[in-house]
Image: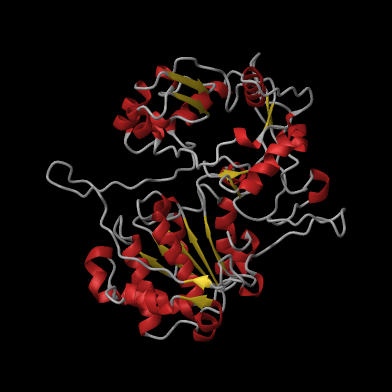
Amino acid sequence: MSNSISDIENSSACWSLATTAPTPHPIVARRVIKARDNGAKIIVCDPRRIETARIADRHLQLNNGSNMALVNAFGYVLLEEELYNKTYVERYTEGLDAYREAVKDYAPEAVEGIVGVSAREIREAMRMFAAAPSATIMWGMGVTQFGQAVDVVRGLASLALLTGNLGRPNVGVGPVRGQNNVQGACDMGVLPNLFPGYQEVTDPAVRAKFAAAWGIDPALMDDQVGTRITEVPHKALTGEIKAYYIMGEDPLQTEADLGLVRKGIEALDFVVVQDIFMTKTAEIGRCPAAGHLLGRARRRLHLRPTAGSSGLNRRSLRAGNVKRDWEIISLLASELGYPMHYEKQPADLGRDARALPAVLRRDLGENGRYGPCSSGRARPSIIPGTPWLYKDNRFDTPSGKGQLFATAWRAPAERPDDEWPLVLCTVREVGPLFLPLDDRQLRRAASRWPTSRDGCR
């Protein structure tokens, strides 16, 4: 997020697109409620009447797969009715002419049939948003799980640029992600194109830094972006991938094209599944291992919120005589030629990450710091935080200006027909975790271990 979660309650308008914040992020939802109590206008765009829609001033119940068309229509209204912040756009953005050309065919009256929302509702919602002195835009997996997700996110950021809602307190844009610790995993580089700390794997200087920290030859490090999970089945079928190590994931339940995923996994020479449960994927794994959620003698969960302070929340889960995730990884690395011998607690592992920003637990304070954090070299006892990004409206572009973006809407690849006359929508629920198996298996596991004094199982 470009702003902090606490900023939301002080926004004059909160606009959410395809996110059920009360379910995966109740803290975010609570801030939205506080914003409403403070007089903010609430705008919700979602095919379903979700919980947030009950308190909204406007609920635009758009058709599935029409996100880009709706975002373009909003941009059209801002320009046609001259609701955009002309001074801000002139000083701090670039690409207005190209943006205007891209949205010229997306008048609300022209896209009513695509979006499923009347032109009047679209115009009223954008007038309400543009009139707010400060506004926050949020989106969820209903945006990011569509094929045109990147375009939509860039389009939403452009609406924030057009209205001057970046680079100052109580405004901004940001994803309300699937679960709390998705952010923490990304921070630690669990992505095919990034090292920990969002440092590019294609940058020779970054590779050299990590090679020095890890004590390896940088020539041994791959200089190419890795394989994304959606690419694995295709590369398995073409023979580009021979083996697959799956840790805490069940792609045979969570991926979109399960038939393709199964074919890809079955075509591999070797599959390892590291998970405490016998998942659908583990059933065809060649070497099941114990691990992931509850399968360890003692596990600590360090949860990193989507935005806000970098504080640490700890819970310990006791189980039987099995190895912890980090122990399995350490032993595997040692067998592969890179010794990893740690005799201390998992919390001590991070002290060897010398290539990461120098943010130690003692520096975070009781309530943490807002990331990103600077090194704090001027005052080593204090790590400065960043409650909101793009101070002075300087952006991470060659020109330092925000880039306006819009592109044509693309219809969903699969549409209802006589054989499949259904439109399905993903739903986030409070009870189950990311997939139904987690919830079912957790109930069984919970009955095996008594509740400890601190209320944790």
Could you tell me residue 81's position as x and y percent? 38, 85
Q: Give the total number of marks visible in the rendering.
A: 0
Could you tell me residue 170's position as x and y percent? 62, 70
Residue 426 in sight in this render: yes
User: What is the residue that sits farthest to the left in this orientation?
Assistant: 418
Could you tell me residue 288's position as x and y percent? 50, 16
Could you tell me residue 267's position as x and y percent? 34, 22
| Colour pattern | secondary structure
Nearer to the camera, 108 or 380: 380
Nearer to the camera, 84 or 378: 378
Quadrant that contains the C terminus: top right
Q: Is residue 166 above or below residue 372?
A: below
Residue 180 in sight in this render: no
Q: Is residue 288 above or below residue 103?
A: above
Decide if residue 133 is on the left or right side of residue 435. Answer: right
Q: Residue at x 27, y 74 (%)?
A: 105
Q: Residue at x 63, y 65 (%)?
A: 389
Q: Quadrant of residue 155?
A: bottom left
User: What is the residue that sits farthest to the front in this orientation?
Assistant: 219
Nearer to the camera, 89 or 436: 89
Nearer to the camera, 442 or 101: 101
Quadrant that contains the N terminus: bottom right
